[in-house]
Amino acid sequence: MRRKIERLERIERLRKRLHELSAWRLAVATQEREKLTTAHGEMIAALGEGLMAYGPASAAGARRVRAIERELAVADVIEKDLEKRTLDDGRLAKLADRYLAAARGEWREGQDRRSLEELIEATVAADPASRKP
């Protein structure tokens, strides 16, 4: 039973680390998407003013805006996937924690039961003469 608990502890630690890693990746993806959103807004604003509004600079700016929009679409898909993965990893971490708690509870109950049995046996074996038939 002790080995089972040790294995479950290792699994629980691993699941928690995976969940933390997934949450970190999600935070990084969110930051990247926010940077792209900011860059998109800045490019749109720049296309309406000054020299960016006319000629070759305007065409290059429009290409850059389209590229940013494609990157934003990819970032959104990645972020949604990472959100799902983070939730799954969190669910599995919680499940591993529950299995570990259940195994520890079973082990404690077994220890308590053995202790009680030992007390009963010691009491019965200690003084057989004091019992009245």
Image (tube, helix red, strand yellow):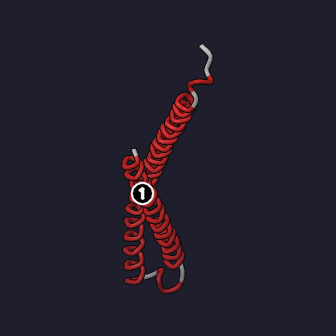
On the image, the x and y values in percent for residue 23 come to 48, 61
Q: Answer yes or no: is residue 29 visible.
A: yes
Could you classify mark 1 by the number of other residues whose Cα lies within 10 Å: few (under 14), some (14-19), or many (20 or more)?
many
The secondary structure type at the circle numbered 1 is helix
User: In the image as oriented, which residue stretches furthest toward the front?
Assistant: 129
The residue drawn where x is 43% and y is 63% is: 21
Relative vertical location of residue 49 with respect to residue 119 in this rendering, above or below = below
Residue 75 lies left or right of residue 124; in this view the side is left
User: Disc 1 residue type?
Assistant: Leu
The residue drawn where x is 40% and y is 56% is: 10
**Nearer to me, 131 or 90:** 131
**Nearer to me, 15 or 65:** 15
**Count of numbered tags:** 1
The residue drawn where x is 47% and y is 65% is: 24
Give the position of the N terminus as an image quadrant: top left
Give the position of the C terminus as an image quadrant: top right
The residue drawn where x is 40% and y is 58% is: 14
User: In the image as oriented, which residue stretches furthest toward the top?
Assistant: 133
Residue 119 lies left or right of residue 89; in this view the side is right
The residue beneath circle 1 is 82
Relative vertical location of residue 108 with respect to residue 23 in this rendering, above or below = above
**Nearer to me, 121 or 48:** 121
On the image, the x and y values in percent for residue 86 come to 45, 54
Q: Answer yes or no: is residue 80 visible.
A: no
**Nearer to me, 38 or 78:** 78
Relative vertical location of residue 21 with respect to residue 96 in this rendering, above or below = below
On the image, the x and y values in percent for residue 31 come to 50, 69
Quarter holding residue 25: bottom left
